[in-house]
Amino acid sequence: MLRTFKHFFFALLGVFALHVTLAQDQEGFISIDCGRPYNSSYTEKKTQLIYVPDTNLIDSGESHSILSEYKDDYQQQLWYLRSFPQGIRNCYKINNIRNGTKYLIRASFLYGNYDGQDTAPGFDLYLGSNFWDSIKLKDAANSLEKEIIHVLVQNYLHVCLVNRGFGTPIISAIELRPLNLSYYKAQTGSLALVNRFDTGSDNPYRYPYDVHDRFWYLYNSNDNWLNISTSLPVESDDDTFQLPSDVMSTAVTPKRANDPLEFWLPDDDNTTQYYVYMHFAEVQKLQPNESREFTVSHDGELFKPRSPDYLQSTTVYSSTGLTGGQLFKISKTANSTLPPILNAFEVYAVKEFLQSETLDRDADAMTKLKSSYGIKKNSWQGDPCTRGYLWDGLNCSYAGYDPPTIIYLNLSSSGLTGEIPHFISNLSNIQILDLSNNSFTGIVPEFLSWLPELTALHLEKNNFTGSLPVGLLQKSKDGLLSISMDENQDPCAMSLSCKKKKNKINNFVIPIVASVGGIFVLLLTASAIRWGLKRKQRDTKSLSQNGPLESVKRQFTYNEIAEITNNFDKSIGKGSFGTVYRGKLGNTQVAVKMLSESSVQGYREFLTEVQLLMRVHHRNLTSLVGYCNAETSLGLMYEYMAKGNLQEVLSGKSTSETLNWEDRLRITMEAAQGLEYLHYGCRPPIIHRDVKTTNILLDKYMLAKLSDFGISKTFPTDTRTHMTTEVVGTPGYLDPEYYRSYRLNEKSDVYSFGVVMLEIITGRPPFLHKFQEKIHISDWVTFMLERGDMTSIVDARLEGNFDTSSAWKAMEIAMNCVSSKPTQRPTMNQVVAELKECLATRNDNAHTESRENSIELSPSAR
Ligand SMILES: *[C@@H]1O[C@H](CO)[C@@H](O)[C@H](O)[C@H]1NC(C)=O
Ligand SMILES: *[C@@H]1O[C@H](CO)[C@@H](O)[C@H](O)[C@H]1NC(C)=O
Ligand SMILES: *[C@@H]1O[C@H](CO)[C@@H](O)[C@H](O)[C@H]1NC(C)=O
Ligand SMILES: *[C@@H]1O[C@H](CO)[C@@H](O)[C@H](O)[C@H]1NC(C)=O
Ligand SMILES: *[C@@H]1O[C@H](CO)[C@@H](O)[C@H](O)[C@H]1NC(C)=O
Ligand SMILES: *[C@@H]1O[C@H](CO)[C@@H](O)[C@H](O)[C@H]1NC(C)=O
Ligand SMILES: *[C@@H]1O[C@H](CO)[C@@H](O)[C@H](O)[C@H]1NC(C)=O
Ligand SMILES: *[C@@H]1O[C@H](CO)[C@@H](O)[C@H](O)[C@H]1NC(C)=O
Ligand SMILES: *[C@@H]1O[C@H](CO)[C@@H](O)[C@H](O)[C@H]1NC(C)=O
Ligand SMILES: *[C@@H]1O[C@H](CO)[C@@H](O)[C@H](O)[C@H]1NC(C)=O
Ligand SMILES: *[C@@H]1O[C@H](CO)[C@@H](O)[C@H](O)[C@H]1NC(C)=O
């Protein structure tokens, strides 16, 4: 029934003169010329439509030109095509379009014997995950178009071609035209074009005649019909179907006045629903004694009689779907003097697109993964979870009509490098993640432990360094997650037992610290070390940003250290261990702690421990960047912490601004996470033994990092639950139980942390001079609480600007930490969990969440 596109464009050529005057607004049009081997867009001569190349919308397929003998018959956008000899499914992804927009989407195909085989192919066309139509091209010379009216459910659109074994799929053009949501509306589903006829006409029309660029095809001659027309323009309401005057100015009428005009709906299957739009306009000036009135009927249904206005369009359509095979009859009424007319009509079939596309977050993560690694796998096209066309290495879960989600991702042996990309954390339903046998470097990121469904994590055969995040270890310990990570750079450093070949880390035990003496004790008694506060100059780059941590050597000679510190010219701190200097390693600011000669002994132990410490990486621990082990000079090089230590910030010494409550909570949380990591994330665990506000340093983003953790504590080789050791630490922070019994375990750190929290809440030092005596902050707080005087506990400089519920919660945590009995103190795991709740109460009405995100992304966060 359809006349071909060839005729269509051939005819359009004849009325070219009109174009310039008619060319108008193409707003929202997207016109893609598929396979055009040039990068620039162009204006098509006949339609004035602007076509863009398809190069950015697809990364597969080949560009071809149709044979020149076919070009003359067609507009330019059909001169080239993209063919897909590789892969079963190939997809275009059209971005930058808005969810909820209704589009007329048209795909055009012209074989044009581009391959000289003279065999026109057949294949399937998909819109996203849903089958749209089968394409069977007749021959080289005739084009085929498929149109559908579809409301977007995403901010992008996939158009896919699927090879069915009947030749190589091709495509010539894709066009999107926005439509008003109020028209062409099916009760459910999208409307695929079956026919669109401009009856009585011998010219086909599209844009610019039709503002929506609908293609109006010619209706083949019907012997029973007569053509009638007007040369006057026919109006169409601006906000309805916006029918072109040229289409509406021609019509058909039955040859015998009393006959009806008839057409049939397709009857190839009885499940398809059809929507029919009949467009009428009177084209003859009626005499006073003339009338034209008719009814439209189908399958017993009858529309009320119509008398179209002169030169004014009107459309008759049913608002519900109709079954196929029906006869449409347009018949004159008894008192009408003229036969019925029909100017144009359209028939659409409903396509129910039931397959949801992959959950947006998941699809987005996969797209980023694909583009950031330039992954070129044939199957990695279109929607990742399309049934039957799953991306290679993926598996999805499908629950009813809900968007599918990714539950399995296998990137094994894909040649991937760099750190594990953060967007993997958006795959929130993933159960099995296999990253093995790549060249991933850096630390295993903490966000992997946030994936709630993850049950298996394969990290083996990579170059990961550092320890596993505490969250992962905990899950593994709880039997929720199996982790395999053999054959990494140094599996021992990753907190896994080297001896065990088992993939599952089940019996995670926390052996408590054993002893080492020597220089470390000296070091830990060091008084406050100030790293560069009040310096005018600021870092231009943070340490971790440019990766000197991993890529640059870490052992330095004395001369190199001298050079780095510019001959030790900027001393920024002093203690019994020696002096701290500021220096520059490349573009990175560092703090170099030189141990005084008197403390240089047992440097082999020093080295062993330094090497272990170099692998302890956590965003809330200052990193050891390097060390110097010249026989007479031992030095340690740390990242430089621009904002100094917490004590200075709290006391207001370093800045005139009072630290606000949100930042206090955040810093508390960050310090707690650093300490938690030492206790639970490192194997063997590390006890800090000198947790205090001067050892909590702040980088230029005010991100808190616990420092000195490597020096003041020691590493066990057995699993004793405590150890006896000399009492070390700082008065005021020292666990009274430890002081009494000399028995050290991680609860001593918890006590000190409780003191730190009290300082943060109250803004007061560990010892207060009150009531003519020196009293400990915990006793003072107890006293105030007993008096019921809660408000005066919180730092007065906050001027009441704090969230009371989070303040009381924090106070409760702190007081539990300073319980005199170690068994009554929480573990750092519990502290972190409680602080999270505390932050959550704050977050209900605050912005802490965004703050957290920004920290995660800041260059110094690890
Ligand atoms: C199109 O641009 C890309 C890079 O933007 C370039 O590699 C390619 O050669 C260009 N192709 C043509 C035909 O100019
Ligand atoms: C698109 O819009 C629909 C309906 O408004 C909504 O249900 C859906 O979540 C939106 N999808 C995206 C990706 O925004
Ligand atoms: C009406 O116009 C069509 C298209 O130009 C043509 O094919 C057909 O023969 C015409 N019918 C009559 C009866 O002239
Ligand atoms: C869509 O049609 C409705 C009803 O005719 C009209 O009110 C609205 O302005 C139209 N929207 C656009 C974007 O043209
Ligand atoms: C549709 O067609 C099939 C086969 O021709 C037939 O079995 C079925 O009853 C029909 N259904 C309806 C609703 O007519
Ligand atoms: C209408 O009137 C004209 C003369 O004015 C006449 O020629 C014609 O036959 C009439 N038509 C009908 C249907 O009566
Ligand atoms: C035709 O007749 C009916 C009544 O039988 C009347 O309501 C209608 O207006 C008439 N139509 C015309 C066009 O005269
Ligand atoms: C994908 O998951 C389904 C259901 O869990 C399972 O039956 C199927 O074997 C999985 N396919 C692959 C390739 O893992
Ligand atoms: C991932 O794929 C590789 C090879 O394709 C296979 O050997 C391995 O078992 C897969 N991993 C998982 C967890 O299924
Ligand atoms: C995760 O998904 C959200 C929502 O789609 C997006 O805003 C965010 O940027 C994504 N995160 C990453 C790291 O890609
Ligand atoms: C790990 O890194 C070393 C040296 O940096 C390199 O030789 C080795 O091939 C890497 N291993 C993997 C699995 O990428």
Image (cartoon, rainbow, N blue to C red):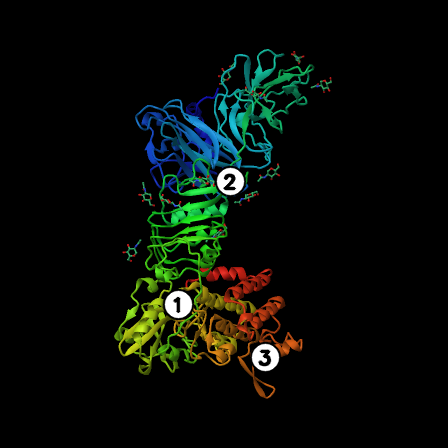
Image location (x, y in percent) of residue 589: 36, 70
The three-letter code of the residue at mark 3 reads Asp
Identify the element where label 1 is drawn.
Answer: loop
> Dot 2: within a 10 Å radius of its alpha carbon, few (fewer than 14), some, or many (20 or more) residues?
some
Residue found 63% across the figure and 19% down from its top? 299
Identify the element where label 3 is drawn.
Answer: helix
The three-letter code of the residue at mark 2 reads Tyr
Q: Which residue is mark 2?
A: 398
Q: Earlier in the sequence, mark 1 or mark 2?
A: 2
- The image quadrant in which ligand 2 is located: top right
Answer with the quarter of the image where residue 69 lies. Answer: top left
Q: Which residue is mark 3?
A: 779
Q: Quadrant of the C terminus?
A: bottom left
> Dot 3: within a 10 Å radius of its alpha carbon, few (fewer than 14), some, or many (20 or more) residues?
some
Q: Earlier in the sequence, mark 3 or mark 2?
A: 2
Q: Which residue is mark 1?
A: 718
The one of 270 and 522 positioned closer to us in this rendering: 522
Ligand 11 within 8 Å, label 1 CB: no
Image location (x, y in percent) of residue 110: 39, 28
